[in-house]
Image (tube, helix red, strand yellow):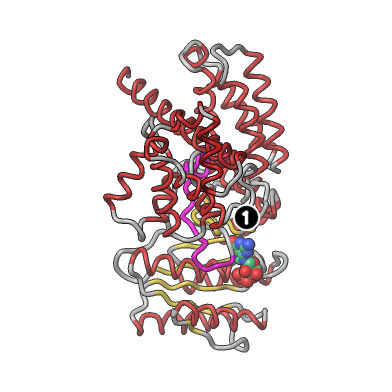
Amino acid sequence: MAFDSLSSRLQMGLRRLTGKGKLDEKDIDDMLREVRLSLLEADVNYKVVKKFLADIKEKALGEEILKGLNPGQQVVKVVREELKKTLGDEAVDLNIKEHGTTIVMAVGLQGAGKTTAVGKMALFYRKKLKKKPMLIAADIYRPAAVDQLVTLGKSINVPVFEMGTKVSAEKIVTEGLKKAREEGCDLVFIDTAGRLQINEELMQELKNVKEIANPDEILLTVDAMAGQDAVNVALSFHKDLDITGIILTKLDGDTRGGAALSIKEMTGIPIKIMSTGEKLDAMEIFYPDRLADRILGMGDVLTLIDTVQENINEEEMKQMAEEMMKNNFNYNDLLKQFKMIKRMGSISKLLGFLPGMGQMKQAMSQVDDKAFDKIEAIIYSMTEKERCHPELIDKDFKRRDRIAKGSGRSIQEVNRLRTMLEQMKKTMKQMKNMDEDDAKRMSQQ
Ligand code: GDP
């Protein structure tokens, strides 16, 4: 997953602070140095880094924090807020009309993932808003582009309007929009031509298409792997087209995160959508707060809950959220969570959303469904009392030995499971404290 190295470096810098009862300016400076290095290493634009650090420093050195309870934790909170702000602050969903036809024009350099993203969005909003999408194939330069869109449309059962590659993009869009109205399609995506590089001719054509279509959204697909180059690409397109939002793609790769953290601050354009894989369901609305939490290893419970929404009824979901936050989280709770997660598909993708799991990744490398079966076997070998009272196992080697033998797993695996439960409990407690601190401060104001 993207951000892994930024995430572990940032967490390392911050962990040193959280254990301390008191902080002085030197502690803060040390932490800032670490944060600076982690951001630069992640290829974040230096201007963004500078502003980020100045803002953190100002807030972190505030009297209220240094003299308050848990100063380290407060600093983590400041960093979390700043990260969120740099990523764009609030999530901005696409501007899709409730009534009438919404037109979305997708632009971007070739290979950034534009065509894939168009398919993903059609699928996503058809499901979410019950819209009737249509795709218009207006990339007439790459010979395979029209075929690619047609195949994509077929695979998700969405109509594709095309006129081959011999007709101008302007004409295709004019006819396509007419067709969409005739067919009652109320969400139209225009897949425009991409080029390897930006050039006059491309921009002129895009401007013409914009003029004809008068789109509600002009979305630019940007490859997260491009790092800071993404900023320059975005600025060039923005200058001519007034981009309304960014689709950041390939966030599933081992990209360092620089694009995500630089683009909003440097261009003012919000990232609206993130694409996290080649499969057509690998798309999410871009939530800055959730991503900030993921980067800081606090998990992303909200995205997890969104993902499971279709598979779990509301009562179960509420229960799950409550159980995750309660202090005496035990093996039975863990088992229940695993069972729910298993119903939802890809375990390794979902695992990253659980609080504290970021740090557990190494210990649980190669996590797959089989790994979960092993964990379940271990929990099943515990007595009911042991599952409800994890401390019984912590104190008693004989119990651990019996559980290991009973489940056919090693003592090390049993111990790893204990560490995992501890880690989850610790992170949840931290999150809860933050919420309580917030509530306290609010009531004092
Ligand atoms: P376009 O030229 O901008 O229309 O790009 P395409 O949609 O054809 O995508 C180019 C390549 O990137 C294809 O092989 C896609 O499968 C792949 N791709 C697109 N989005 C993602 C993503 O989020 N993650 C990964 N790993 N691959 C992606």
The span picked out in magenta is: 278-299
The amino acid beneath tag 1 is Ala
| Image region (quadrant) for ligand 1 | bottom right
Q: Is mark 1 within 8 Å of ligand 1?
A: no
Q: Residue 180's spot in the image, x, y percent?
A: 40, 80
* Residue at the image position 52 percent from the left and 52 percent from the top: 372
Question: Is residue 275 one of those drawn in magenta?
Answer: no
Q: Which residue is mark 1?
A: 234
Q: Residue 425's spot in the image, x, y percent?
A: 46, 33
- Classify 10 Å Cα crowding around label 1: few (below 14), some (14-19), many (20 and above): many
Apparent side of residue 267 relative to residue 345 in the rendered image (left or right): right
> Quick one: 219 or 224, which is closer to the camera?
224
> Quick one: 370 or 360, which is closer to the camera?
370
Q: Secondary structure at mark 1?
A: helix
Q: Is residue 204 visible?
A: no
> Quick one: 80 or 397, which is closer to the camera?
397
* Residue at the image position 65 percent from the left and 23 percent from the top: 31
